Amino acid sequence: MASTANNPPLNDIETSKLIAQLFEISKKLQSRLVDYRPESERSPPPLYDDFAIRVNTREIEGDHRYSFNAAVGMITKLLDPLDGEHNVQKNAQLREVAELNETLEIKVFFPESLIHAIFMVMRFILPLLAL
């Protein structure tokens, strides 16, 4: 899947921010503050953190759902492969391989107006210089 209009390609800064956020959410999900009982239980017993402070279990349950959905969104964004022109690391590796193989080609594109000007010089001025 290439990047689409809905999912623009990520640069290195955005990728590192997403990885940091994903790490924080992963730490929250791995903590013992998450209540895994079925939702049908109306009043779950209170949970206590590592410092024996009672925490609001409904708030943690909501945070858990939000964190999980946020983590899923970040992972899908990180797993979305970049197309060739936006993948800086891939382009650098391909350039290095081409330099090693001595097959590196640098393409230069000229605007149409410049090509037209060169054509005019070749057609009209060069014959005058030959006289």
Image (spheres, helix red, strand yellow):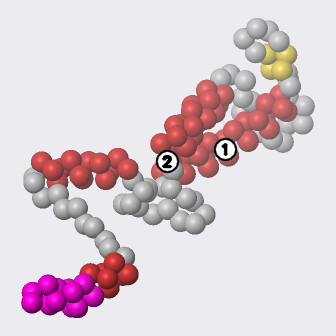
At label 2, the amino acid type is Asn
Query: Does 4 appear above or below 45?
Result: below
Residue at numbered disc 2: 11
Which one is closest to the eye, mark 2 or mark 1?
2
Q: Tell me the residue at 36%/60% (across/down).
A: 84
The quarter of the picture where residue 50 lies is: top right
Mark with earlier residue (2, 1): 2
Magenta stretch, main secondary structure class: helix
Image x and y of residue 77, in percent: 55, 51
Along the line of sight, the residue nearer the viewer: 85 or 15: 85
Q: Tell me the residue at 26%/81% (across/down).
A: 118
Image x and y of residue 115, in percent: 30, 81
Query: Does 124 appear above or below 89?
Result: below
Secondary structure beneath label 1 = helix
Along the line of sight, the residue nearer the viewer: 9 or 56: 9
Q: Tell me the residue at 72%/29% (across/down).
A: 34
Q: In which quadrant will I find the N terminus?
A: bottom left
Q: Is residue 31 magenta?
A: no
Residue contact between numbered discs 2 and 1, judged by CB atoms under 8 Å: no
Query: Does 67 appear above or below 79?
Result: above
Pointer 2: residues within 10 angstroms few (<14), some, or many (20+)? few
The quarter of the picture where residue 28 lies is: top right
Image x and y of residue 67, in percent: 69, 38
Residue at numbered disc 1: 70
At label 1, the amino acid type is Ala
Q: In which quadrant will I find the C terminus?
A: bottom left
Q: In this view, does 95 lie to the left or right of 84?
A: left
Q: Tell me the residue at 65%/23% (across/down).
A: 31
Q: In this view, does 91 lie to the left or right of 79?
A: left
Q: What are the residue bounds of the magenta stretch?
A: 119-131
